[in-house]
Amino acid sequence: MLEIKGIWKTFNAGTVNEKVALKGVSLTLKDGEFVTVIGGNGAGKSTLMNAVAGVYPVDQGSIIIDGVDVTGLPEYKRAPYIGRVFQDPMMGTAATMQIEENMALAARRGQGRGLRSGITKAERERYREMLAALGLGLEDRMTSKVGLLSGGQRQALTLLMATLRKPKLLLLDEHTAALDPKTAAKVLETTETIIQRDQLTTLMITHNMRDAIAHGTRLIMMYEGRVAIDISGEEKKKLTVEGLLEMFSKVSGSTEADDKLLLS
C-alpha cells in the first residue's frame, strides 16, 4: 500500500544551517499494516511523514501509494489517498462549524459540490451511530460548535473524520502528544479499534516508547535520518522498553541517546 524508495531530504542546502533530515530511507507497508514510528528529536520521523503527505518535496527517491507514484504530486493532489491526524487538536476540524457539519465535509471530501440540501436524515443517523461508538457523548451534541469541545473530544472527532472515507493510508502525527495521559489512552484505544475494524494501512509517529510497543503490528525506530530498527510479529509482541533501548544502543553505538528517547 505504501512504498518509499531511497528518499533523501536536505533542508537549507549549501548554507551553514544545512541539515540532512532523511538519508536514503526505504520502507514498504503492506495493505492493512499498522506501523508505529519512534525516535529522538531530529531523527527524521516528522520529515518522513511530511514527505509522504507531500508537505515537503523529496530531493531524491520515490513515494508510491497503492501503485500510484505520488512523488511529484503536491499535497492537495495526494489528499484523496491520505487521512491525517495532527498533534494539535485544533487542526483537522473547523471550530466555528457544528460537529455534524464537520463530519459532512469529511464524508464529501473529493466529491463535486452542488445545490442539493445539506445533511440528510440518513446521514445524520449514520453520524450519530459513529459518534456513539466513541463513547464520549458526542452523539448528543451534534449541533454543538467543534470549538467548544475538549482537546480529547476534538482529536477523537478528527480521527473519525480522517477515516470516514476509508483512506488508502492513515497518517497519525503524534496525535495524542498534546493530551493528558487518561485522554490519550482513550484516543489510542479508539484509534486501534478503527484501524482494526477498517483494516487501515497506518503510519503512527509517537514519542512514547510504551505506546509504540503496545500498539500496531510493526515498530520502526529512526536515528539520524535512517531506519535503525524494524521489528514485527512475535519479536514485537515480546518487546520491552528496556529491550528496545538495548537494541538502539547497539545500532547507534552509544548509550547517550537513551535518556533523550525516554524524556522525549
Image (spheres, rainbow, N blue to C red):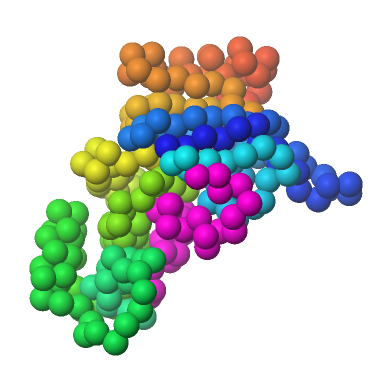
* Residue 213, horizontal then vertical, whole percent: 38, 27
Q: Name the residue located 60 percent from the left edge and 32 percent from the top edge.
A: 5
In this orientation, which residue lies closer to the viewer: 180 or 33? 33
Report which quarter residue 36 is drawn in. Answer: top left
Task: Look at the image and tell me in which quarter the N terminus lies.
Answer: top left
* Residue 230, horizontal then vertical, whole percent: 50, 21
Report which quarter residue 134 is drawn in. Answer: bottom left
Report which quarter residue 69 is drawn in. Answer: top right
Question: Could you tell me if residue 49 is visible in this image?
Answer: no
Number of marks drawn: 0
Would residue 58 be found to the left or right of residue 80 on screen?
Answer: right
In this orientation, which residue lies closer to the viewer: 135 or 58? 58
Would residue 137 be found to the left or right of residue 90 on screen?
Answer: left
Q: Name the residue located 44 percent from the left edge and 41 percent from the top edge.
A: 66
Vertically, is 195 above or below 232? below
In this orientation, which residue lies closer to the viewer: 10 or 145? 10
Q: Name the residue located 38 percent from the left edge and 46 percent from the top edge.
A: 168
Vertically, is 50 above or below 161? above
Q: Name the residue located 61 percent from the left edge and 47 percent from the top edge.
A: 71
Q: Magenta stretch containing residue 87, yes or no?
A: yes
* Residue 118, horizontal then vertical, whole percent: 23, 82
Q: Magenta stretch containing residue 144, yes or no?
A: no
The magenta-colored residue range is 68-95
Question: Could you tell me if residue 60 is visible in this image?
Answer: yes
Task: Look at the image and tell me in which quarter the C terminus lies.
Answer: top right
* Residue 165, horizontal then vertical, whole percent: 30, 57
